[in-house]
Image: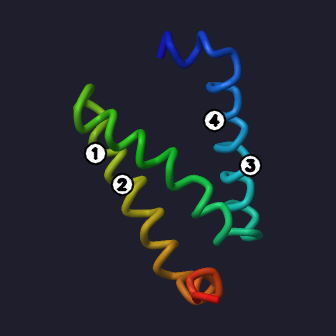
Amino acid sequence: MVGMAASGYLITSIKIFELLCAIAFLSGRFVPLATVVIFPIIFNILMFHLFVEPSGLLTAILLMVGDLFLAWYYREKYKPMLVPK
């Protein structure tokens, strides 16, 4: 955390993205985009709790399951991105 805070922008950027994704989830708008944007943040939370601080592992797993469920639910929205041109 000290290294992330020392960068001066990383913590602020992460929190802004988390807030924007939370607003998207709660409003029901841009949910597929928010699901993709929040995935790397949730993945890092999961890895942190898996390897460094296991006390929050259950919450991290629940976040990942929720994000993967939303990705599966909106899978039709992602198909155009995955078509080779």
Residue 83: x and y in percent read: 58, 89
Tell me the residue that label 2 is attached to: 62
Q: Amino acid at mark 1?
A: Leu
Q: CA distance from mark 2 to mark 1?
A: 6 Å
Q: Tags 1 and 4 in contact by the CB under 8 Å rule?
A: no
Q: Is residue 57 left or right of residue 76?
A: left
Q: Residue at x 58, y 63 (%)?
A: 35
Relative to 70, say whether 11 is above or below. above
Residue sitting farthest toward the front: 85
Nearer to us: label 1 or label 4 = 4
Relative to 47, say whether 5 is above or below. above
Tell me the residue that label 1 is attached to: 58
Q: Tags 1 and 3 in contact by the CB under 8 Å rule?
A: no
Task: Tell me the crowding category of disc 1: few under 14, some 14 to 19, or many 20 or more residues within 10 angstroms, Cα based.
Answer: few
Instruction: Determine which of the numbered discs, if any, sits on residue 14 in the image.
Output: 4
Residue 81: x and y in percent read: 63, 80
Of the numbered discs 1 and 4, the one sitting upstream in the chain is 4
Tell me the residue that label 3 is attached to: 20
Quarter occupied by the C terminus: bottom right
Q: Residue at x 70, y 26 (%)?
A: 12
Q: CA distance from mark 1 to mark 4?
A: 21 Å
Nearer to us: label 1 or label 3 = 3
Q: CA distance from mark 1 to mark 3?
A: 24 Å
Q: Amino acid at mark 3?
A: Leu
Q: Amino acid at mark 4?
A: Ile
Q: Tags 2 and 1 in contact by the CB under 8 Å rule?
A: yes
